[in-house]
Image: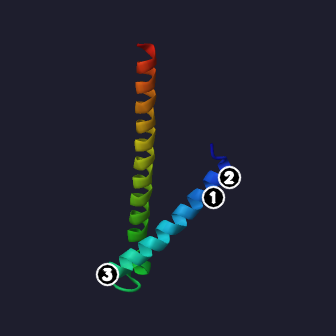
Amino acid sequence: MLDATTIERQAANSAAYWMERAVTEIDALFGEGYAKQHPELIAAFMKTAARDELAMNIRGIAEALETFQVTIFRETE
């Protein structure tokens, strides 16, 4: 299990990566400097990335629970 300090560091690294990626992708679509002029697009990109990561984590938990349920079911038979 990860400790709180590691989780906090990973969260900061993820946010920094998403911000850099947002600027790169937005500028690639709309032209150099567009992201800087439209910080709301950077924020929307980051929210979307965070929600996607959350969804993937929930999916991982659901898959783990499915495995756990199957194991319990088989052991009780």
Q: Secondary structure at mark 2?
A: helix
Q: CA distance from mark 2 to mark 3?
A: 38 Å
Q: Residues within 10 Å of mark 3 (few under 14, many from 20)?
A: few
- Seen as rendered, the residue at the extreme bottom is 32
Label for residue 71? none
Q: CA distance from mark 3 to mark 1?
A: 32 Å
Front residue of this view, candidates 39 and 75 = 75
Label 1 sits on residue:
9
Label 3 sits on residue:
30
Q: CA distance from mark 2 to mark 1?
A: 6 Å
Colouring:
rainbow
Q: Residue at x 62, y 42 (%)?
A: 1
- Where residue 46 sits, quadrant-wise, is bottom left
Label 2 sits on residue:
5
- Is there a contact, CB below 8 Å, between mark 3 and mark 1? no
Sequence-first disc among 2 and 3: 2
